[in-house]
Amino acid sequence: MLATEALANIRIVLIQTFHPGNIGSAARAMKTMGLTNLVLVNPREFPHEDATAMAAGATDVLDQARVVGSLQEAIVDCALVIGTSARDRTFSLPPLLPEACAEKLVQESNQGPVALIFGRERMGLHNDEIQQCHFQVNIPANPEYPVLNIASAIQILCYEMYRSLDRQDATHVDGVGDDYPLVDDLNQFYTHLESTLNHVGFLKPQHQGQTMPRFQRLFRRARLEKKELQLLRGMLSRIEKMQPDASDSSNH
């Protein structure tokens, strides 16, 4: 795949951006490094003259930006999702530094869409949003003031992706042959898993809200391949056929 095609598969996703000017600055930061695929999740105001002014010569990125209503909608067809986070999390994901993050995104963009997620200017990503990611990336900064403007963070990570293209041979990329499922495929698996666990009486109503997110984090860390996911789906279907419905037996 050509470098330009790989970059086109890298999706920069901004969640609920408050200041329209930051959207324009993000577009400019992207275009300087060859990226053009911008997705906005519930921006406060867009289109907006401030976004256009701050984009300078990158208004084409704004013109083709896609506005969606949820993070799920933004990443449903992606096989790799990386969230940016400067905070310690109760449920942390495998961490990446910017260079490793860029290499992973560029490598897997040769196979299909991937996404890099940026949260709100003041609050970043919510826990339920970071849990929809496979990895999280943190940009090292002065520990006494580790505050980066969102456009600056985008610029740094887009720069690392641009550099990564120079380091990687487009005809031989580590990881080619690994066929990862899309986010939508994983979500269907999680629904199937929850149904089966309810079927056999494993999930307890008082703990269900904690148990399923833990399973989801486990499988995201494992980075299941498509064939492995199909194997698990087949196993769940077999269990459901063999095991009587626990909810039925509890009613007798």
Image (cartoon, grey):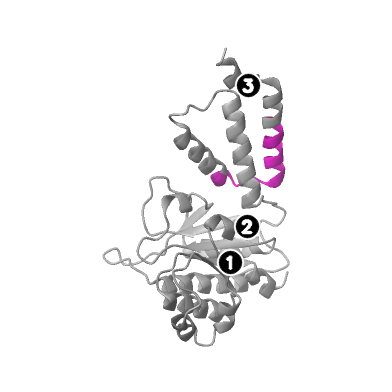
For the point 65% across and 19% down, the residue is: 244
Q: Which label number is shown at residue 11? A: 1
| Image location (x, y in percent) of residue 204 | 48, 26
9 relative position to 97: left or right: right
Indicate the amino acid at tag 2: Cys
Identify the magenta region.
220-235
Amino acid at dot 1: Arg
Residue 136: % across, % down: 47, 56
Which of marks 3 and 1 precedes in the sequence?
Answer: 1
Percent x, y for residue 179? Answer: 70, 51
- Mark 2, residues whose alpha carbon is within 10 Å: few (<14), some, or many (≥20)? many
Residue 133, above or below 191: below
- Whichever of callouts 3 and 2 sits on the residue coming sooner in the sequence is 2
Query: Is residue 96 among what the camera can see?
Result: no
Numbered tag placed on residue 245 in the rendering: 3
Q: Residue at x 73, y 67 (%)?
A: 171
Query: Are circles 1 and 3 on residues that touch, CB within 8 Å?
Result: no
Q: Are marks 1 and 2 in contact (CB under 8 Å)?
A: yes
Work out whether residue 42 or residue 36 is closer to the camera in this orientation and state it.
42
Amino acid, disc 3: Asp
Please name the residue shown 72% across and 43% down the image: 227
- Which label belongs to residue 133? none
Q: Where's the C terminus, which quadrant?
A: top right
Q: Which residue is mark 2?
A: 78
Any magenta on residue 204? no
State which quadrant residue 107 falls in. bottom right
Q: How many marks?
A: 3
